[in-house]
Image: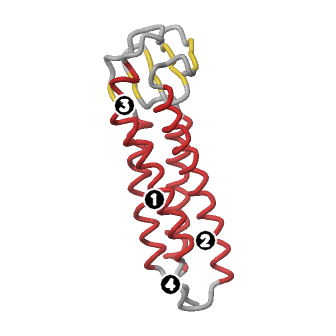
Amino acid sequence: MLILLAFIIVFHITSAALLFISTIDNAWWVGDNFSTDVWRMCATNTSACMAITDQFKEYQSVQAVQATMILSTILCCVAFLVFILQLFRLKQGERFVVTSIIQLLSCLCVMIAASIYTDRHEELHKSNEYSIDVSEGQYGYSFVLAWIAFAFTLISGVMYLILRKRK
């Protein structure tokens, strides 16, 4: 039982770490001489970065991705705290339903963010406001980590729903 508890805690912390990295790091869309994320665009050869502001045509889409990724990260951390609290407060045999709901909401938020970015990436990167051409690129590791975090939060949300408290 202790090994299962340790696995669940490590799995949840890994999910949170993936969410933090994918939200913060500058690699949602990368090319030979640039990398962009939902916060800024950086040219790798000059190491100059430019913030993505409301001057961009698709700024509302970027803001939606920013908001849902931040909300997903916060919900994942809250779910972990609720899980720890429920470990001490639940009676034997009860399920971790509240933790599961919060974790599944986190899963939903990261899915929405990655889906919006997937749908709107062409319009985002064809904007004339960028100092260099960023249309010729590919998805970066932060984008991939966001989808992996989606899978991890979904699995842990379902795991909490199935899990019962034991001695």
Sequence order check: which comes first, mark 4 or mark 1?
A: 1
Sequence order check: which comes first, mark 1 or mark 3?
A: 3
Picture colour scheme: secondary structure
Q: Nearer the viewer, mark 2 or mark 3?
A: 3
Residue 85, image x, y percentages? 68, 74
Residue under circle 1? Answer: 153
Alpha-carbon distance for marks 4 and 1? 18 Å
User: Label 4 is placed on what type of residue?
Assistant: Arg
How many numbered tags mark residues here?
A: 4
Alpha-carbon distance for marks 4 and 2? 12 Å
Label 1: few (<14), some or many (≥20) within 10 Å?
many
Residue under circle 4? Answer: 164
Alpha-carbon distance for marks 4 and 3? 41 Å
Alpha-carbon distance for marks 2 and 3? 35 Å
In this view, 67 is above or below 158: above
User: Label 3 is placed on what type of residue?
Assistant: Arg
Residue 137, image x, y percentages? 33, 21
Would residue 87 be found to the left or right of residue 165 on screen? right
Image point 43% across, 31% down: which residue? Answer: 28
Residue 110, image x, y percentages? 46, 49
Residue under circle 3? Answer: 120
